[in-house]
Amino acid sequence: MIGRLSSFASRSLFVFDPEKAHGVSISALKSGLLPACSVRPDPRLSQTIAGIRFANPLGLAAGYDKNAEVPDAVLQLGFGFTEVGTVTPKPQAGNDKPRIFRLVEDRGVINRLGFNNEGHDAAFARLSGRGAAPGIVGVNIGANKDAVDRVADYVAGIRRFYALATYFTVNISSPNTPGLRDLQARDSLKALLDAVLAARAEEALRHGRSVPVFLKIAPDLTEEGLDDIAAEALAHDLDGLIVSNTTLVRDGLKDQVTAKEAGGLSGAPLFARSTAVLARVRKRVGPDLPIIGVGGVSSAADALEKIRAGADLVQLYSCMVYEGPGLPSSIVRGLSTLLDRENVTSIRQLRDTRLDHWAAAKL
């Protein structure tokens, strides 16, 4: 029944343009119109990553709940965790509309939103209203387009949300804010991580707990760029990496008309590239640094393949556009079935089992 409702909900939203459909889905979650999808706890899916206990490895990536409007409703869909944002210190409208485009034949999405959000204050008020509600809610922080000092914007995000975030994601990999990806260059990245982690250390003393910080990177980096990021990640007290954001690459798409739209491509076409980059990163950072794998996950098999390629946790977003709100619970149940088939006692046992395959894959 839930599967049929999920499919119907997904098809119904296609009568709207993509950005309107996104707003309608947020409203539906707020209203409680979408039923909760109960997922039976499976201890084989539970892991402690970066000091946080995750009931299952599937999360919702940033970009959906930009303004922290529905984190608890999202968690009721079966996700083990969710990530709000990207939030910037000041509200900003983002880029001109239209700025989201469906590639239905490819089951992909192109967006050039540009960190549209209501700013720190609005997200802070909503997250504060959660009180002591359970659930893992990460906060994805970014910089305003017109910021004179972008590093200071990231530091402001750490300080503003420290008491509320389960973890932070430092997003320097969106292709839709001019110059943002320049922060991935080694010297710039070092300065950013120095500042962000110094702020985290100060807030940890003040609050009596250390909140993990993840760095989200692009799938379009060169081998030398991956070397630099891995080196800086290991040189700093960083808690993990998120691989990856959207891509500017348009290889192999059926919809060559929509493919010409500017912006980042996500969804099914991103799976192979993002998974290959994930494996390359795992090879560089070794077995201990946590990695969240993102890009093109639309099934339990996809999620498990990310883990086999080196991910500890997995996130999705764009594939829900096509599969509907029942996708997360379907994936979590499917992972349990796959673990039955593999006859393992923990999903951790399957991590890296196809690392070499994916690390050798062509980009």
Image: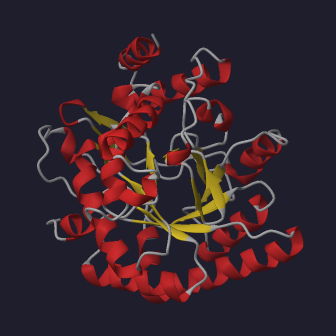
Rendered residue at 66%/82% (across/down) = 195
| Residue 50 in view, yes or no | yes
Work out whether 77 lies above or below 335: above
**Quadrant assignment, res 103:** top left
| Horizontal arrangement in the rendering, residue 93 relative to residue 241 (left or right) | right
Q: How is the image coloured?
A: secondary structure
| Horizontal arrangement in the rendering, residue 350 relative to residue 313 (left or right) | left
Residue 82 vs residue 355, the one in the foreground:
355
Rendered residue at 25%/35% (across/down) = 107
| Horizontal arrangement in the rendering, residue 297 relative to residue 46 (left or right) | left
Q: Position of residue 171 (x, y in %)?
A: 52, 63
Q: Position of residue 106 (x, y in %)?
A: 20, 37
| Residue 220 in view, yes or no | no
**Quadrant assignment, res 256:** top left
Q: Position of residue 70 (x, y in %)?
A: 65, 34
Q: Position of residue 54 (x, y in %)?
A: 60, 50
